[in-house]
Image: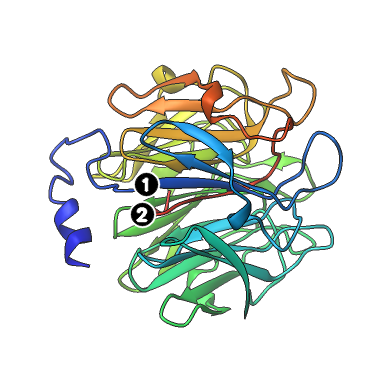
Amino acid sequence: LMLKLNSLSGFGSGVSGGGGNTSVYGYYSEGQISTGGETDTTDRLTFATSTAAAHTDADSSYSREGPRGLYCGTVYGQIGGGGFPRTNDIQKFTWATSVSATTTNTLAIAFLGMGVSSDSVTYGYWCGGDDGAASTESCRTTFATGANALHTDADLSATRKYVSQMTHPLLYGFTVGGYTDPHPTFTADSDRITFSTGVGAAHTDSNVSTTRGNMGNVSDYTTYGYYVGGGNDVITDRMTFATSVVAAHTDSNCVLNCANGQGCSGQLYGFIIGWTSQYGSHETPAQRMTFATGVVALHTDADATGGFGRNHPATLSDASPN
């Protein structure tokens, strides 16, 4: 915990470039694939080289579309939910070994397309999503045990599914955008959880600039977080952590329109994996943001492997919740 707090000493001082994130590896796992159906495979992204490769030790026991990855502190992460039919299964990632395994812990609700956030120390939250319809319900994972339970204090202010998420370093978690019913009706709304109390509420300052869903999210974990693409668009919005205010940031727009994406972040770069209608399938090259400039570019060395892209994958970073 001391290392975590010290690493954020530049927070609010304009420091950028990912000074608070010490991640070594990121992961893309599961999701729908362009060859049909879902996959249980996992790719591991080495942040030092910005290169992804198949990593069978981290392959999942499940093949699911729409799971989400939760950072559960310095020891492990979880991938949960997703699938048709929807599931409450959880897969556990142990950072020290890069191994994924099944666990007896399950989500309190079987759903997909949730918003996840983590205080990095004690609790993680799974909010909204599709449990058969757009939902307001929230669950909370206790990192010490891996157990998950309903947590009504963090329920969303309105029903939403296929949402995006952001974690403000150690202070807040956000569930943003997505669809309402009837599908597909987009929203720009945001809810914010205050980690010190575990309570959530609508937070209009962090609404995104246009209504859309399934935005990928990356963060320098110090100054800015980004909602990239979504709704088959190239638009990117940027959150300023010091104020929690979100605004369009055209310098960070995608190269290719991106939907159903997820992101993982290292110290210098953030990576978005998703789907683009410009290819007419679920295939897409990785898009990489350079945090020092906020600019996004294609980066094929980080593409998902296996000859197919990933639609609605789960992503994880081993030292960051975004």
Can you see residue 138?
yes
Q: Quadrant of the N terminus?
A: bottom left
Disc number lying in front (1 or 2): 1
Residue 213: quadrant of the picture: top right
- The residue that disc 1 covers is 24
Left or right, 19 with reference to 254: left
Residue type beneath disc 2: Ala
Where does residue 188 sit, x and y in percent of width and height?
55, 41
Left or right, 3 with reference to 166: left
Left or right, 81 with reference to 262: right
**Mark found first going from the N terminus, 1 or 2:** 1
Where does residue 115 sit, x and y in percent of width and height?
55, 55
Q: As drawn, which residue projects farthest toward the right?
A: 36
Question: In the rendered image of this protein, does residue 117 appear above or below residue 270?
Answer: below
Where does residue 249 sit, x and y in percent of width and height?
40, 24
Counting the numbered discs, the total is: 2
- The residue that disc 2 covers is 319
- What mark, if any, has residue 12 been given in the picture? none
Can you see residue 114?
no
Residues marked 1 and 2 touching at CB (< 8 Å) = yes
Q: Secondary structure at mark 2?
A: loop
Residue occupying image coordinates x 41% and y 41%: 265
Residue occupying image coordinates x 69% and y 51%: 66
Residue occupying image coordinates x 74% and y 61%: 62
Question: In the rendered image of this protein, does residue 11 appear above or below residue 131?
Answer: above
Q: Nearer the viewer, residue 271 or 181?
A: 271
Q: Residues within 10 Å of mark 2 (few under 14, many from 20)?
A: many
Where does residue 283 sit, x and y in percent of width and height?
72, 28
Q: CA distance from mark 1 to mark 2?
A: 8 Å
